[in-house]
């Protein structure tokens, strides 16, 4: 019985190797790239163990602020955030939206709700659970819906 099993296992292994060889041979027939493939990440080539240097620019609005569609909807971001850095050590959004800088930059101040913990305790700085802005806030755009839907704004928001 053991000899029959060993023979079957060897045949199965041989068949798998033949199949893999055929698959590799067909892949070898595919045309090779004409040159090195150059990939560019969102960090612009900055290594993961380094931070991108923040740039001191005033962001102009791309859009007028959009109306909200339902209660408790986080406001949409009316400008591009391409290249914005939000890490545990730096938040580009706070260059304009912090309490101390909002008036000078003409930006909307961060809501006081962002300074409370989950238990309602008020903090002196942004709550860690509200620090990564793009978890809730997204740039607004005039994109068409990806799928048909019957969504309608909340009656109180119309």
Image (cartoon, rainbow, N blue to C red):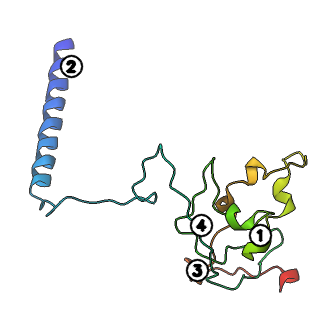
Could you tell me how far apart the alpha carbons at marks 1 and 4 are, in whole angstroms?
Answer: 14 Å
Residue 155, image quadrant: bottom right
The residue singled out by tag 4 in the image is 56
Report the residue at 76% width, 62% height from top.
98
Q: Nearer the viewer, residue 24 or 114?
A: 114
Asked if marks 1 and 4 touch (Cβ < 8 Å), the reply is no
The local secondary structure at tag 3 comes to loop
Report the residue at 84% width, 72% height from top.
71
Which label sits in the foreground, 4 or 2? 4
Could you tell me how far apart the alpha carbons at marks 2 and 1 are, in whole angstroms?
Answer: 76 Å
The disc at residue 5 is 2
Whether residue 108 appears in this view of the structure is no
Q: Is residue 74 found left or right of 7 in the rendered image?
A: right
Which label sits in the foreground, 2 or 1? 1
Q: Residue furthest top?
A: 2
In this rendering, the answer to whether 66 lies above or below 134 is below
The residue singled out by tag 1 in the image is 102
Which label sits in the foreground, 1 or 4? 4
Task: Tell which circle, 1 or 3, labels the residue nearer the N-terminal end.
Answer: 1
The residue singled out by tag 3 in the image is 145
The local secondary structure at tag 4 comes to loop
Residue 140, image quadrant: bottom right
How many residues crowd mark 2 within 10 Å: few (<14), some (14–19), many (20+)? few
């Amino acid at each position: 019985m053991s000899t029959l099993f060993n023979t079957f296992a060897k045949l199965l292994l041989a068949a798998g190797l033949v199949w893999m060889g055929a698959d590799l041979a067909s892949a070898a027939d595919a045309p090779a790239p004409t040159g090195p493939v150059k990939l560019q990440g969102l960090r612009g080539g900055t290594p993961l163990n380094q931070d991108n240097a923040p740039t001191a620019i005033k962001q102009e609005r791309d859009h007028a602020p959009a109306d909200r569609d339902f209660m408790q909807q986080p406001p949409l971001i009316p400008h591009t955030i391409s290249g914005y850095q939000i890490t545990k050590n730096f938040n580009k959004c706070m260059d304009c939206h912090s309490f101390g800088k909002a008036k000078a930059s003409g930006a909307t101040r961060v809501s006081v709700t962002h300074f409370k913990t989950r238990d309602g305790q008020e903090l002196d700085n942004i709550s860690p659970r509200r620090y990564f802005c793009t978890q809730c806030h997204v740039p607004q755009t005039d994109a068409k819906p990806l799928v048909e839907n019957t969504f309608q704004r909340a009656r109180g928001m119309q």
